[in-house]
Image: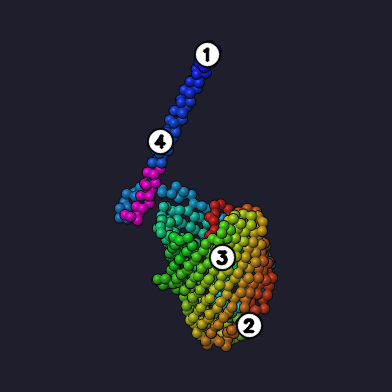
Amino acid sequence: MLRPALLAAALAAAFPAHADDQADLAALRAEVQAMKTGYEARIQALEARLAKAEAAAAAPSAAPAASAAPVEAASSAPANPGAFNPAISLILQGGYANLKDIPARQIAGFLTNDAASTPARGFSVDDSELVLASNIDPYFRGYFNATLNDGSVGVEEAWFQTIALGHGLTVKGGRFRSGIGYQNEQHPHAWDFATNNLMYQTLFGEGYGNDGLQLRWVAPTDLFTELGAEIGRGAQFPGTDRNRNGAGSYALYGHIGGDVGESNSWRGGVSYLSTRADARTGTLTDSNGTLVDTAFSGDSRTWMADFVWKWAPLGNPTVRNFKFAAELFRREESGGLSCSGGLLCTGSAGAYQATQYGGYAQAAYQFMPRWRVGYRYDVLDPGSREYGLNDTALPRTDYRPTRHSLMVDYSPSEFSRLRLQVTQDRANVGQDENQWYLRYIYSLGTHGAHTF
């Protein structure tokens, strides 16, 4: 009698438990089904939004004639909510320079931009830069950079750029730094050294900018491939403003680049700039060692080659990183040159033909967070020069200007940098000089990242 009773009790206890499990399973199934239904609804909603956005993006190029309705919609609601809040930044630069008292610094054998600023002795404030940048609407981006110093304001850059052409194409218009070379697009606060390299100082003064148009295409390939073409006013050195219609200069360039493993990346390219000068002023040293004034009129053509290699362990540059950059140039100028002043120059114009070379190589190494050291070597070759009627007045020196620069800088944060640099300058005959620079660079506000 005892066994049947125990069996009955066990069955009675087992059946309620089985019933509870079935209820839990049913509840779980219902919950899963509800989640699936909810996610499917959300996915369908997102797909509908995506299709609508793609249709809106394709509308301007697909049907430009039917633009009345979109224009009306755009005028009633800003396409870019941040259009009235551009990124604004102010770059403060200055420091101290220990230099010899040399009234007129020259680069032996080269016609240079005498209007370019030279470092001031002692304490000084360099140009401060005020920068505004923002997307204008879904189709354009705008950028403005003004330099401020001692009652003067200069427009360094002021341009618009397309952002919706697609196919890797962009068009930039206004005043901008040319895409030729490597360093040319960089403003002084982005340089790795306190002073400009000798090559850019000789070719352009600081860098080559232009008022005009730029077309740039980035190919849809694994290997970074970029081609660019520019036309412009050509008013900046080595050209001059000639007050005429049409283009005064044009430039072509191409770059390729890529990654090597997870820690290395590189970029190389070639560039060409053609412009024309009319009575471009300059100075040279005559056969008596006297500075004389010159005026050049003719064609100026410049070829450039650039290469950059960067290393950062596993792509993380915050602790250690290394950067190597080098550029070379060849400049040809032909036309007429007059010289005046001194005892030998009579102001008469003679034929002028010059083919000159030069370049620089530099490296910067961050050996621990916030600390970097760097070295740069500059060299120029005056090449061949023919002065025509002024051959007897203007000597052709074979002196090669050089510079060696060492720097160490410390960046307390990404917004501030302090730099010490010593330079052995041999840019001119008989003017060897050891130069010392202390520099500060501070960035206030929102400032966009710099290019590679």
Helix, strand or loop for disc 4: helix
State the residue position of label 1: 5
Pointer 4: residues within 10 angstroms few (<14), some, or many (20+)? Answer: few
State the residue position of label 4: 37
Q: Earlier in the sequence, mark 1 or mark 4?
A: 1
In three-dimensional space, the C-alpha distance between marks 3 and 4, rounded to whole angstroms, equals 54 Å
In this view of the protein, can residue 217 be seen by the observer?
yes
Q: Which amino acid, by three-letter code, is at mark 1?
A: Ala
In three-dimensional space, the C-alpha distance between marks 4 and 2, rounded to whole angstroms, equals 90 Å
Q: Which mark is in front, 2 or 3?
A: 3
Which labelled disc corresponds to residue 342?
none
Pointer 2: residues within 10 angstroms few (<14), some, or many (20+)? Answer: few
Q: Which amino acid, by three-letter code, is at mark 2?
A: Gly
User: Where is 107 relative to 436, above or below?
Assistant: below
Helix, strand or loop for disc 3: strand
State the residue position of label 3: 308
State the residue position of label 2: 289
Asked if the residues shown at circle 2 and circle 3 are in contact, with their CB atoms under 8 angstroms apart, the answer is: no
Instruction: Tell me what residue is drawn at x 63 percent, y 63 percent.
Output: 364
- Position in image of residue 415 (x %, y %): 60, 54
Q: Is residue 67 left or right of residue 24?
A: left
| Span of residues in magenta | 46-63
Q: Earlier in the sequence, mark 1 or mark 2?
A: 1
Q: Which mark is in front, 1 or 3?
A: 1
Along the line of sight, the residue nearer the viewer: 357 or 246? 357
Along the line of sight, the residue nearer the viewer: 413 or 136? 413
In this view of the protein, can residue 147 be seen by the observer?
no
Q: Which mark is in front, 4 or 2?
A: 4
